[in-house]
Image (tube, coloured by chain):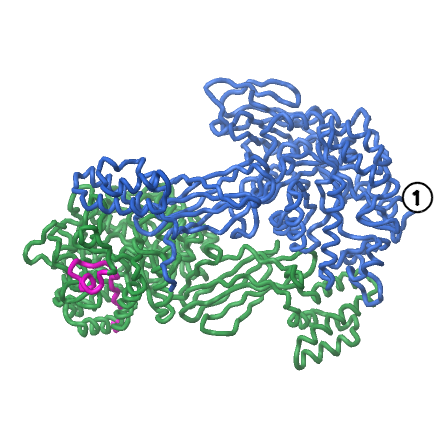
Chain colours: A blue, B green
Amino acid sequence: MSDRPTPRVVIQGVQPEIDCGRFPIKRTIGETVDVEADVFADGYDVVACVLRYRHEDDETWSEIAMEPLGNDHWRARFAVGKLGQYIYTIAGWLDPFQTWYQDFLKRISAGQDVTVDLLIGAGLLQAAAQRAAGADAAKLKRLASGLKPADVDDRLSALASIYADRTDATFHKELRVTVDPIRARFSTWYEMFPRSCGTFKHCRRVLPEIAELGFDVLYFPPIHPIGHSHRKGKNNARKAGPGDPGSPWAIGSEEGGHKAIHAELGTLEDFRNLVAEAKRKGIEIALDLAYQCSPDHPYVNEHPEWFRWRPDGTVQYAENPPKKYEDIYPFEFETQHWRSLWEELKSIVEFWIEQGVRIFRVDNPHTKPFDFWEWLIRDLKKRYPDLILLSEAFTRPNIMYRLAKLGFTQSYTYFTWRNTKNELTEYFTELTQTEVREFFRPNLWPNTPDILHESLQKGGRPAFMARLVLAATLGANYGLYGPAYELCENVPSEPGGEEYLNSEKYEIKRWNFHDTSSLRGFIKRVNAIRKENPALQSDESLRFHPIDNDQIICYSKHTSDKRNVVVTVVSLDTVWKQSGFLELPVDELGIDVRHPYPMVDLLSGARYMWQGSKNYVELRPGETPAHILKRE
Amino acid sequence: MSDRPTPRVVIQGVQPEIDCGRFPIKRTIGETVDVEADVFADGYDVVACVLRYRHEDDETWSEIAMEPLGNDHWRARFAVGKLGQYIYTIAGWLDPFQTWYQDFLKRISAGQDVTVDLLIGAGLLQAAAQRAAGADAAKLKRLASGLKPADVDDRLSALASIYADRTDATFHKELRVTVDPIRARFSTWYEMFPRSCGTFKHCRRVLPEIAELGFDVLYFPPIHPIGHSHRKGKNNARKAGPGDPGSPWAIGSEEGGHKAIHAELGTLEDFRNLVAEAKRKGIEIALDLAYQCSPDHPYVNEHPEWFRWRPDGTVQYAENPPKKYEDIYPFEFETQHWRSLWEELKSIVEFWIEQGVRIFRVDNPHTKPFDFWEWLIRDLKKRYPDLILLSEAFTRPNIMYRLAKLGFTQSYTYFTWRNTKNELTEYFTELTQTEVREFFRPNLWPNTPDILHESLQKGGRPAFMARLVLAATLGANYGLYGPAYELCENVPSEPGGEEYLNSEKYEIKRWNFHDTSSLRGFIKRVNAIRKENPALQSDESLRFHPIDNDQIICYSKHTSDKRNVVVTVVSLDTVWKQSGFLELPVDELGIDVRHPYPMVDLLSGARYMWQGSKNYVELRPGETPAHILKRE
């Protein structure tokens, strides 16, 4: 037993709080953090509590009084206006003068003699005066010296409360929120192999078109020298033919490794120029962070201690038994020399940050230790809080969520494999309506160079349009492996597989962006709708709505002031016309059902007069398999 | 960065775990603790994990391998066979030989050359041999010296796993479970003012009857000397008349305080004899622990520092402004002399423990500091692990739950004020199907000397029968303020109030236990049913079932082996006949619906042949407003 009993106020059930405070939550700049908690004490004393917060670079705390919601539940919110991490916590204490004041009012109402009570109240004011200074101290002292019933009012009580004794305040553990740039929440990615344009200089010419299409992140697969040992040929052939360029993920050759640029793409200066020109067009260049080496990578000779060696004196290549990837050497993250390895890997990111890159798509982070990522991201974000890291971990949910918790800014999702109404509803409800939304920012990709889903293979153009609309409206962050998507490339390398035939990973493609059947116009329209409608720029307002047809999915997003409400309706049938009656929660969406209200289809421009909560929709896959409807 | 990277295995989402491990869960002796968690690592290495547990008095841990349930979720259970606290945790580590073995099998299946792989496997066995001893070490060493494909099998893999390197194991924080005696889970309380029998010697004569009624806890309001200053008269009159005995909760007079016995009840020896005699009849005497004093309590003179003093030189009496309770002085728990006060208060419990008492009903614990209780209970339970403390905190849910978490064995509930089907269903689902069940043991009281609910005032005998059945079957722990309940006393002291007219708190009553209209026979039957049916002796299997009549509530309890299934049906209408079709989840209850099955009403003895999941019931309040049906 210590010299004082421990503080009597209990603070529990604090939300948001991830894994008992082990991990920060996430916000983007300008957003708010709504904090709720149960705060209470034994007995009948009045409890006061505040939300405390500060940016980690600031020393002084700001405080906001929490609002009681009943049953010991309290709430307050603060806005995050600066990149980096904020710290927040709750403090609670007893307020004896408030307790006294509330009792006093009851005694007065009951006509009781309050002579002794006034002496008690005066004693409390005297104590408050000692904690106050200046005019307040003087005022409290004066009142304490001869307290009269007429002195006692809400103003006096509020003044005394300011100087309540906090010696025995209870403090909740300090929680954190990582504040990222807006693009962490709202971004539109275009993936492109720069070598298919030619050089970085050729890529510069494509920038205006990509900007016009409405993309603001241009992501390149690795741009480094490519190994020649065990180089893969076209369609992942075990042996490359002469002239086969190899997979960009087989990083490193005699020409250099992760900090070098493939000579055929240009120079470092060309790259810096491209980055700068892209920024002027509103586009960030995103690089691929693939921590692995080709057998020809300089690291293999210079740092053999960073790799695992087999008893036959060879380096352990990547494997997924019985499959062997002899063109790839993974790092041995648990080598005795892990410090130097980890520092070097971090320096790769620093190198590209210095060239102007702020967004990285991280290849297979789930095959590297969690603590490596937590250390790397924390350190880099401290110095470069505008950094964005997209986790490409297609693995089990616990692992994907762990990577998000420990710092990844955005994450690939299972979207590609969620195709039915039930699958989509269940998954996106989990991502946006549960605790997951506090740490996991979904980035939705209908395709990638690795994944051509069966629905696209079989559904053709209507499927490409439907999946695009789903990605772009379910997710404020979405991306396309662009050239193949625009042209509705849908032939797999083998039946039942998800690899592209003649995959761009193993050969240089020349895409005809001006094909008349291209989806360019549609993509441009969809991206413009995203830019014009703030409702589509975040995910937490996503709600699914009933419609009496399993082939049609309906959902809405809205801004917190409900001025911008967007209702999306997508047909999952790529062949037949589908129709049904959908039902909107009109009250929640702020729709007045006493009058008809116009809904404009932002895709087609059509204008519908709706009435009440139930309305009819009809979709023809041959035309446009979706409505993106805005309440005018 | 430390010298080694941190362990790669993650353990999260451990259940049960209360408030991040801050509080123990509860079990009774012989029960099991089912522990589940997500355990995983980065990459593809095989993870192993165990549940570890030990009694706090033991030094060595027991381990149980956890069973993988898919998606990184694991489960294991252990039984608690000893009173006191057990500690449990989870340990997880990587098992490189298992990883190697699983890959090896795939390589063999694919017909690959495994020469180098055998060398790698041998190296792992060599390392395992170094951690092993005796025959195992020798065997591992021998195999390591020339590993052949034929040597590699499940047995070898299992042997190597035993000696997996745990240097980098991850350990979850240590969690606790308090193991209480069976009576903490299953008890039947009878509350009686001993002075209404006369003396303790007279009470002894009543013991056989109480035992016959099926009660196993006999709870007495305070048995100490009663103050005379400001003593309350009949019906809580401000002034006592001559001969008015006063409220037993106004504890202390010149004759003594909390460690003394009211002279009119007998001597300490009489009390000890009563306790011993009760034990022989299977009954525990429970005492009231009311930490407050009458103005005449010896503490007031001997320890003025334990009370709060008003500026007029008087002791602060209890208040709920504008109400004043001048016959009661609360303790000042935060006095500078809190250590001596707290120790003295603890010594009161110790005193009565020494007289043979093991059960205490604690009066208004929510008006004393949480930390006081946590300290007192933890210390006492360490020495007397069979101690049972019932929390009488009728206050807000957070506070009631907090008291349960910090150590109270059982708790009063809102049962008295939950009367409709919806209210009962919602409340008891919360108590038995959520995390609450891990720490809060409900004890259901249809009445107390303070609470005569309107439903009993207005519903008469059918209401007394229905509320009794509800309490006795919804709660494995339940109690009655017995004499008044048996005789269906239902006149309140004022309309709209919940106090009894001529309350026994302020006068000595002589009850006619042999009134022919008494509920004795019915109570005896209900308590016998509880004793014969283990399904009714715990709460976690409670499930509510649909019935197409809002005036009838239906629920079941069953043992884990489903050998004992009890379905209770209660009419909430005290006037009219009610009937309906109820629907049982026959699969969950292990009922074979291909054949009719007999259901016996344990209250009436009637036998019904039921068929399928839907069956008809009909209840007449004039007869018996309930069925307690057992599947034969």
Pick the front one: A72 or A632: A72
* Amino acid marked by disc 1: Gly
The image quadrant where one finds the N terminus of chain B is bottom right
| Residue A237 higher or lower than B63, as above or below | above
Judge whether residue B600 can be spotted in this image: no
Name the residue tied to disc 1: A243
Q: Residue at x 79, y 44 (%)?
A: A222
SS for callout 1: loop
Residue A398 image offset from top left, x and y in percent: 61, 51
Which stretch is magenta?
B279-304
> Which quadrant holds residue A357?
top right
Q: Residue at x 69, y 31 (%)?
A: A574
Pick the front one: B197 or B464: B197
Judge whether residue A49 can be spotted in this image: yes
Q: Residue at x 63, y 46 (%)?
A: A382
| Residue A544 higher or lower than B416, as above or below | above
